[in-house]
Image (cartoon, rainbow, N blue to C red):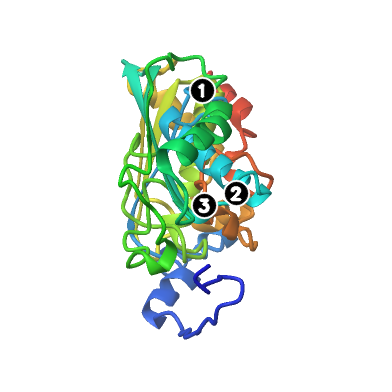
Amino acid sequence: DKGFDGNSCGVSLSIGQQSSDIAQGVDSAFEKRVSSSVDPLDLQGAGDQGLMFGYACDDTPELMPLPISLAHKLSLQLSSIRKAGAVDYLRPDGKTQVTIEYNGDKAVALNTIVISTQHAPHVDLEKTLTPDLKKLVIDPIISGLNIDTSDVRILINPTGRFVIGGPMGDAGLTGRKIIVDTYGGMARHGGGAFSGKDPSKVDRSAAYAMRWIAKNVVAAGLATRCEVQVAYAIGKAQPVGLFIETFGTEKVSPERISDAVLATFDLRPAAIIKDLNLLRPIYSATASYGHFGRELPDFTWEKTDRAAALKEAASR
């Protein structure tokens, strides 16, 4: 409508080389330079310092927190009906938010759903947009929930109008959306964004690996909630810290879980890249609907392929 299309707009490229000071730590890790290691997986150092977190819980079959899982599913459903032409007045910009009531660490009720979606100017919010979204977007997603949905509050376009959208309506992707990309605030975040970074940057690759670990811990039955924290120093292959939090839900001691993780997973950047096969052009799919909880073939960090090995290691 506004003459802006990501498939046809002009794109200016200005690509420079990475700092040679950084590159020397990535290409020749501390372990090689100082310890003279010849292990091929010791040769690549972390591309930056920092903390990364991964999380999993038994809220959903994909072992994600229920609020962010529902928010992503609503967004995908909203996009799907627009692309299918089920309603002809929807436009591409939009977002969702879900509030869930918990009793302890168990979801018990659906409290609020917020959907903001761009639309054509002529659409009536109360007579058309709201009933259409309830029927075509919300009901298909929440109908199978095993929590109380009887008193859910639904807010559609709470400003009253959403005609101007996309890059014409705002200043851009200012914060790079690190919480909606991960766990919706249910877990901590080290602060490093994912997008725009290749897997030599542990902001991305290690965060994916921590999700992989946390999901396998829960899938192995070692805990019902698990948050994994790792820390790296720039230019060093081995992490400088690993901490596992199970929030009192562990079935074996946290120390045994931590030892089992270290025995089962190699946390050096080169090993993460190899094990998760991250040197592939797979990342465009992460631009919407979240980086975690989507069990797509390319999202290797969502596999529970080491749950059995973890369980065995924790039993020793």
Chain-order first, disc 3 or disc 1: 3
Determine the secondary structure under disc 2.
helix
Q: Residues within 10 Å of mark 1 (few under 14, many from 20)?
A: many
Q: Nearer the viewer, residue 236 or 247?
A: 247
Measure the alpha-carbon separation of dots 1 and 2: 48 Å
**Residue position marked by numbered label 2 in the rendering:** 82
**Residue position marked by numbered label 1 in the rendering:** 314
**Where does residue 225 sit, x and y in percent of width and height?**
42, 25
Question: Can you tell which mark lies on residue 104?
Answer: none
**Residue position marked by numbered label 3 in the rendering:** 288
Q: Nearer the viewer, mark 2 or mark 3?
A: 2
Q: Nearer the viewer, mark 1 or mark 2?
A: 2
Measure the alpha-carbon separation of dots 3 and 1: 36 Å
At 54% from the left and 41% from the top, the residue drawn is 265
Chain-order first, disc 1 or disc 2: 2
Determine the secondary structure under disc 1.
helix
**Where does residue 234 sit, x and y in percent of width and height?**
36, 64
Three-letter amino acid code of the residue under disc 2: Arg
Q: Nearer the viewer, mark 3 or mark 1?
A: 3
**Where does residue 80 sit, x and y in percent of width and height?**
62, 45
Q: Nearer the viewer, residue 251 or 42?
A: 251
Chain-order first, disc 2 or disc 3: 2
